[in-house]
Image (spheres, rainbow, N blue to C red):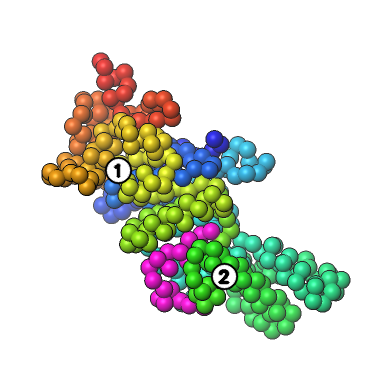
């Protein structure tokens, strides 16, 4: 398989009044083309921070302080990859929602309550696909009025609309509103974008999409809101879709529908999905490859079947042992101890204070990842030469 995204020694910290929260500690991960990659771990372990770091939307007072985020898109001009950490904010604005999109955990926070859902989906088309929309509108108008009449206006209208879309200043909008041709042009582009939004919403299994696009988020159920958030993320057919706990607040029936929807969409529209969750059942059903995170560190990375059949890291083993089972009648197992304070995390392996198999060396230095074969990587001294000394 070919790489799509690779993080190299990624460090993200939050500078607070209590101290520096070390949220991500030298994260090294590879997401390949064509896979659903699961990232699992306890709440607060850094999963969402990792997703926001890739998107370069880490909230203040957090910031990326070291490492690289390399993307390998399907083009000849970046075979060596592009480091997103080094790119400008303008570059990232054009990238987000286009080649990389994200489904946020809470749809109520992701949707604008003052805009119709149709306008929110159409916004992605208007921002990222201006050239395509302009070409379609010009073609339609050409068929109505004669292409020779409109041909001289093509470059001018496209350029002016591009300025208006990227700089929504009040004076630009006032100029457009007072020029009939430009105002007509803007309305036609919005109509085309809404038409595409209706088609996309219909493809997600939402009934009566023509009526739904005129509604506001408060008119929709939780499952419908989540589908609208997915529609916004999918509008430009991203190569990487990041789903951050996309089904955690939904009931089991709606959760199954959303997961089935994501599975079908990946087969035809999306290159790869990074699925962030704490639900191991969802991972087992959905993912091809899995990484286990604990307190800002990656403990284990493996193919999903291999991880569930043969977990190697003590933390992974403890997580799987804590999953409730229908046939189990005893006391549910739990992981002893508490999650460490990331302002002052334990030295060495951050899991060692809770690990039943910890050794002296575990508290001295963080272990390097060891390849156990079959691309099964484990960061644990149990599988290194030091454990046998």
Picture coordinates of residue 340, whole percent (x, y): 23, 43
Image point (34%, 45%), residue name: 40
Q: CA distance from mark 2 to mark 1?
A: 42 Å
Q: Which residues are magenta?
A: 214-234
In the rendered image, the vertical position of residue 124 relative to residue 35, given as above or below = below
Element class at badge 2: helix
Q: Earlier in the sequence, mark 2 or mark 1?
A: 2
Picture coordinates of residue 274, whole percent (x, y): 45, 48
Image point (66%, 82%), residue name: 177
277 falls in the magenta region: no
Main SS, magenta region, reads helix
Within-10-Å neighbours for mark 2: few <14, some 14–19, many 20+ = many
Q: Along the horizontal axis of the image, is 144 left or right of 230?
A: right
Pointer 1 residue = 295
In the rendered image, the vertical position of residue 9 relative to residue 45, given as above or below = above
Pointer 2 residue = 198
């Amino acid at each position: 398989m070919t790489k799509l995204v690779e993080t190299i020694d990624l460090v993200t910290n939050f500078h607070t009044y209590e101290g520096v929260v070390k949220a991500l500690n030298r994260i090294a991960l590879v997401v390949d083309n064509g896979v659903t990659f699961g990232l699992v771990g306890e709440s607060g372990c850094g999963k969402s921070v990792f997703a926001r770091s890739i998107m370069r939307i880490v909230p203040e007072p957090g910031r990326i302080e070291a490492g690289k985020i390399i993307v390998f898109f399907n083009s000849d001009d970046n075979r060596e990859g592009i480091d997103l950490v080094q790119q400008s904010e303008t570059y990232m604005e054009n990238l987000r929602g286009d080649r990389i999109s994200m489904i946020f955990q809470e749809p109520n926070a992701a949707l604008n309550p003052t805009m119709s859902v149709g306008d929110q989906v159409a916004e992605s088309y208007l921002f990222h696909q201006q050239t395509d929309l302009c070409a379609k509108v010009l073609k339609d108008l050409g068929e109505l009025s004669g292409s020779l009449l409109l041909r001289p206006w093509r470059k001018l209208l496209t350029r002016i609309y591009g300025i208006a879309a990227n700089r929504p200043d009040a004076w630009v909008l006032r100029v457009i509103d007072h020029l009939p041709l430009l105002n007509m042009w803007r309305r036609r582009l919005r109509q085309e974008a809404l038409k595409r939004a209706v088609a996309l919403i219909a493809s997600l299994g939402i009934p009566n999409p023509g009526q739904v696009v005129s509604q506001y988020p408060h008119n929709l159920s939780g499952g419908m809101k989540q589908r609208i958030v997915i529609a916004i993320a999918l509008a430009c057919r991203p190569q990487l879709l990041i789903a951050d706990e996309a089904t955690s607040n939904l009931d089991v029936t709606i959760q199954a529908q959303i997961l089935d929807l994501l599975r079908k969409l990946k087969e035809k529209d999306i290159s790869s999905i990074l699925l962030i969750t704490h639900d191991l059942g969802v991972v087992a059903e959905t993912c091809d490859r899995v990484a286990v995170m604990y307190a800002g560190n990656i403990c284990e990375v493996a193919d999903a079947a291999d991880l569930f059949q043969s977990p190697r890291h003590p933390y992974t083993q403890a997580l799987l042992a804590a999953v409730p089972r229908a046939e189990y009648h005893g006391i549910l197992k739990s992981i002893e101890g508490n999650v460490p304070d990331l302002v002052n995390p334990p030295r060495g392996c951050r899991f060692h204070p809770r690990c039943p198999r910890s050794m002296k060396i575990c508290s001295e230095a963080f272990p390097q990842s060891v390849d156990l074969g079959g691309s099964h990587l484990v960061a644990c001294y149990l599988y290194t030469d030091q454990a046998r000394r």
